Amino acid sequence: MSKNGDRFEPRIVGFLCNWCSYTGADLAGVSRMKSAPNLRIIRVMCSGRVDPSFILRAFQLGADGVLVAGCHPGDCHYQEGNFKALRRSLLLKRVLGGFGVDERRLRLEWISASEGEKFARVSTEFTEEIRALGPLKLETAMIPLAELEREEVPA
Amino acid sequence: MSKPTLALYWAASCGGCEIAVLDVEEKILDVAAFFDIVFWPCAMDFKYKDVEAMPDGSIDLCLFNGAIRTSENELLAHLLRKKAKVLVAFGSCAMEGCIPGLANLTTKQAIFEWAYKESPSTVNTNGAAPVPRYAAPEGELEIPEFYESVRTLSQVVPVDYFIPGCPPQAPQILAVMTAIMTGAQLPPPGAVLGAGEKSCCEECGRVRKEKRLKRFYRPWEIEAKADECLLDQGIICMGPATRSGCGALCVKANMPCRGCYGAAPNVADQGIKMISALSSVIDSQDAGEINRILDQIPDPVGTFYRFSVPASMLHRRQA
């Protein structure tokens, strides 16, 4: 937290698809667009590759929010991987809610390769939304100690 | 030569695992003849001080069923870990929390409110509620503390083996006991015994087709066809995410798998696996329609995590 005065700096993990969203993020970068630096990007081949357990793992290891971004409907490089991601995120949101985790901490967005501006806007918007929600304090007391030690992630 | 020693204990459980042990029928006599049963509170009169008096590591095999819900459960988990050479988490409660573990979706306070005040069958005119210590005229009485969360056995002490099931099925129990009694080489510690290495679907004889679902049914809403995959028919069956070993008992009785054998091998979180599986077969690409289809699953957490909330990646409802 708080590298910036007392302001909470959320840790956000972004799973971006190789064909559209990652390229869109790249475009935002080379175009020198301003966006919040809180997003840690992981490139995946398709938003449909993002197993829901990856998302929970991110939360478990200290992410305050998770962004999954893929091609617009109809544009998926693998035809319908992004629809899989859509169905998963809608079901996972319900389960997160059942576990008392605010479903807004998971966000799905369609960002094409030409939408650098949208990527910059989404990452800033999402960062502000998570900042307003505050840190996700998962109860980790029940995770066996050995597991936590092995997977300690620096801030 | 003295006989190997056996202990059986129940913590937060319903007692079904104890009955499951007896379901091996007359073979229980072989078990009793092979082992010297040194602790089995459900069946015989033992006191905790008897166990405390045993040398450390003197119990050859301890089958521990039940989750860790109270300070008494935790005390016995530590005690039996110390006294037992081989500690087995026996049954779904000890392995993943099971039905008692669903309490992790609420709070201790809410449970007490319901159990001692609000439930329609409760008559409690003077508002009595349990307290850990009570000064009675005869002296101070102490009862175990009720914890906020239910934990699995391996979240409290190191566990050597796991036998899944609610309850474990008798032929599987017998196979494990026979292996132990004949001195067969057991797998390395941490292994799951008395179960298969695939998903429940492998043991199911129903015909599977390409799944395309627009509607989910609860079992009473539809007359299920006897030979078709229940999930194909829109009934949520936990088979794809559940470990094999039971012989697909429920499915053979025309009821969907509820997932009591726990997560399939190499699956970190049973409910998450089911979310993944169901998301692949819902036949819609429209967010509104998908949500309408998902509305037909009234309790997703209770359905996907019926037996595994404490063992799941999130462990409990977050405050």
Image (spheres, coloured by chain):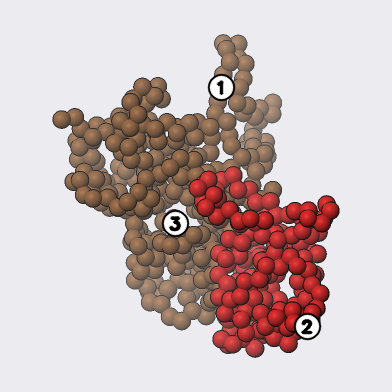
In the image, what residue occupies the spot 81% across and 74% down? A34
Mark 2 and mark 3, same subunit? Answer: no
- Residue B59 place in picture, x, y as percent: 31, 33
The disc labelled 3 sits on which kind of residue?
Gly
In the image, what residue occupies the spot 75% across and 67% down? A37
* Residue annotated with mark 2: A31
Chain identity for the colour brown used in the image: B
Tell me the CA gap for discs 2 and 3: 50 Å
Q: Which mark is residue B17?
A: none
In the image, what residue occupies the spot 46% across and 62% down? B267
The disc labelled 1 sits on which kind of residue?
Glu
Secondary structure at numbered mark 2: loop
The quadrant holding residue B89 is top left
* Residue annotated with mark 3: B262
Mark 2 vs mark 3, foreground winner is 2
Whether residue B217 can be seen here: no
Crowding around mark 1 (Cα neighbors within 10 Å: few <14, some 14 to 19, many 20+) is few
State the residue lying farthest toward the top: B138
Tell me the CA gap for discs 1 and 2: 70 Å
Q: Colour of chain A?
A: red
- Residue B161 place in picture, x, y as percent: 36, 47
Q: As rendered, which of A59 and B3 lies closer to the eye?
A: A59
- Residue A27 place in picture, x, y as percent: 73, 83
State the residue lying farthest toward the right: A5
The disc labelled 2 sits on which kind of residue?
Ser
